[in-house]
Image (cartoon, grey):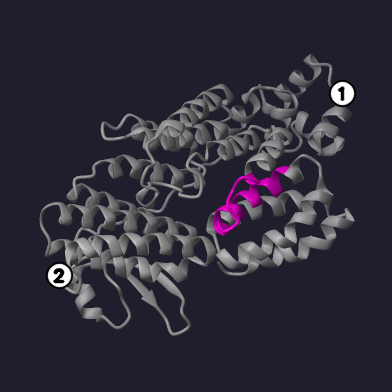
Amino acid sequence: MPLGARLRELRMAQGVSLSELARRTHYSKGYLSKVENGVQAPSSTLVRQCDGALEAGGELIARCRRDEPRTTVPGRGPDDDNGRNWMLHMDDQGSLWFRPMGRRQALATGAASILVLGGSGSVRSLPGEEAVAAFTTMFGHVRSLGQQSMPDVVLPTLVAQTQTLRALAADASGRVRRDLLVLASRYAEYTGWMAQEAGRTEAALWWTDAAVELAEAGGDDEVAAYSLVRQALVTMYADRADDTVALARRAYGHPAAGARVRGLAAQREAQGHAINGRASECLHALDRAEALLDRADDSDPSTRLGSTTLANPVRLTRAWCLHDLGRTAEAVDLFDRELSATPPGARRFRARWQARRTLSVALSGELEQACSMIPGLLEECARVGSATIRTDLSALSRTLIRHLADPAVRGVYPALSAALQTPA
């Protein structure tokens, strides 16, 4: 049965008029009629709103997902040195970009414009134990800076410090060597996240692999499990929900995964289920994630895998899953409650979730409220720069463009459109 026909069947079975469905979803009655009669193909946003309005439990979303084209994640491509080196190039305007390169190519390019993770070299300026303490402290500072500024501000520092830690580890032994390598893996993992925030998916995946290699060399196998969670995030933003669920389940079942990594994996699995409209599986995974993260040992937040802003981010993730399931009014209530508990200094974190909250507010029909939030949101986004936030801003733009007759929308839409046209 075509999706539109099934929508009409569900609506009529519940005794909901077309006018009432239009009121609940904030789409016009004429548009909904065209969808039901197969004249107009529905957007995924409309399908999610209808699913939530009719309490269809994800059935309409799942039907729509089966018919949608799938996007792909860029491959990492072989390098003549197995991809061991990565070039960070900076031009005279301060713009950065990454690309993999072999050792011979790195030597030919010269050191003036690159920082390379890999190759030989030795740094003996700090004794081992002092280096561990100093770089652990610096890592906290760099993470804090990453919450306040553009990704390109912290990437050069992260690359250089990761390389320095590797060189120090090469000259160390025993426990000091292991500590240096594990700390280097945390730097590399965060470098991958900043690369993703800068919109460089290939680099993000490469740095995640580098983090696994460094952690395994230091005897910390849990990072290998966590890397699957990071890869699941990349596939989620590429709209590959089935791959997201599969990777998250692999992380959850990894023999080295502790309670925190398993909790983060269950959280990512829930997001994949929400995208696919599998409501019951989503909510069950969220319950598992919340329980695991509540009991995880986070006695040392300086080296905590994943976000350090909240020890348990599942409640915010639950709000976003409700949004994806078309239950936007419930999502807004949960966003409002949980965002009030986030530290004001975590600008990147707050901006990301504020963007999602604003989109939920707009889809719940509160256009004036959503529009009042946009100027402050755009100001924060301009400060931190984020490819992931731009994804949600694009969805917000597509939602608001349907309501350009509304004065509040007309007042903010030009600024939103201009922000999306500005290079990340």
Q: Secondary structure at mark 1?
A: loop
Q: Tell me what residue is drawn at x 52 percent, y 67 percent.
A: 150
What residue is pinned by disc 2? 120
Three-letter amino acid code of the residue under disc 2: Ser
Q: Secondary structure at mark 2?
A: loop
User: How dense is the environment of label 1, judged by Cα within 10 Å: few (below 14), some, or many (20 and up)?
Assistant: few
Measured from the top left, where is residue 135 in percent x and y?
30, 63
Kindly tell me whether residue 117 is visible in this rendering.
no
At a point 55% along the width and 56% down the height, the residue shown is: 346
Q: Horizontal and vertical percent for residue 110?
A: 24, 81
Range covered by the magenta-colored residues? 339-360
Instruction: Give the amino acid at mark 1.
Output: Ser
Q: Which mark is residue 17?
A: 1
On the question of residue 196 being in view, the answer is: yes
Q: Would residue 170 be found to the left or right of residue 360 on screen?
A: left
Nearer the viewer's eye, disc 2 or disc 1? Answer: 2
